[in-house]
Amino acid sequence: MRIPPVGTARPAEMIGDVPTLITDADDPRVADFRDLVSGDRRPGTPRGTGPVIVEGVPAVQRLLASPYRVRAVFGVPGRVGALDLPDDVPAYEADKWLLSEIIGFRLTRGVLASADRRPPTALDELLTGPDPAAPRRLAVLEALNDAENLGSIARSAVALGVDGLLLDPRCADPLYRRSVRVSMGHVLALPFAVLGEWPGGLDRLHEAGYLTVALTPADDAVDLTSLDPREHPRTAVLLGAEGPGLTAQAQAAARVRARIPMREGVDSLGVAAAAAIAFTLLR
């Protein structure tokens, strides 16, 4: 059992290392987890507000290692207690039926956590990074309003060495529960910023030394494999929403329009798959 430092009391929600048992669906201590099926915002609240919700043991472990402050952990018996939670994190458990009643769906991953939101990274900080002289790669997303695609792109970005996400104002919330779930919590380690002026704001990337590459299946685009990443230490890959893809305005604002070479008869890939391929080829 972990022993808190002298003079530090354990939170009332923990008895030793045992989470507090919740028996009432209206218990205010688990209010963060109530009715999680109402879309990317709580009723009556603006988009992109409220706590970050994380599902599943691996994702919660990544949350604990992230800069986000954990508000509470809630799950079925055994799952919460198996996590090595800091002493100041309130922990609760309930049987699977009550848990499902509270959150609004059957949770197969056994545990959830809530965390305080962090504001988006300042644009200049995202573009420069901790080392202004270091190679840097970004994923730039236009009108990507599918939360699960965004989460999948974030997971690939972390795995394949992309340093951050730059979103246009119409993109989905990267901290929405479904984005975080599909990313397996990796999005919590990925800085992101919002480019309010779109697509004219892409000039900020060019000023910072980025080659902007707009991904498109168009026949007149260059072959993505012809771009040598060693010649372009700072690269930003532009990706559009599933279906419509990048707008003509965004493509015109980029320095290069590039396509992924594909077998004849296949006109395009899903945006998450295309992103992973582009991240790999431009690594």
Image (cartoon, rainbow, N blue to C red):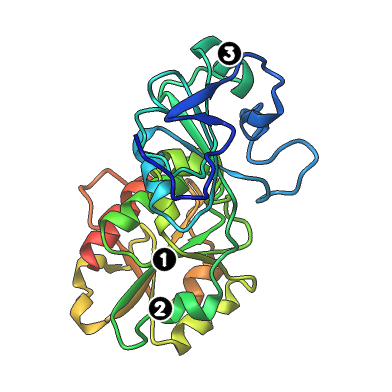
Q: Are marks 3 and 2 in contact (CB under 8 Å)?
A: no
Image x and y of residue 252, in percent: 49, 74
The amino acid beneath tag 3 is Leu
Q: Residue at the spot x=45%, y=78% of the render?
A: 127
The amino acid beneath tag 2 is Gly
Position above or below: 234 against 44: below
Say which residue label 2 marks: 129
Mark 2 or 1, closer to the camera: 2
Image x and y of residue 49, in percent: 68, 50
Mark 3 or 2, closer to the camera: 3
Q: Are marks 3 and 1 in contact (CB under 8 Å)?
A: no
Q: Residue at the spot x=42%, y=82% of the render?
A: 128
- Compared across the picture, whether 231 is left or right of 249 comes to left
- Between disc 3 and disc 1, whose residue precedes? 3
Classify mark 1: helix, strand or loop. Answer: strand
Tell me the tag on residue 164: 1
Tell me the tag on residue 98: 3
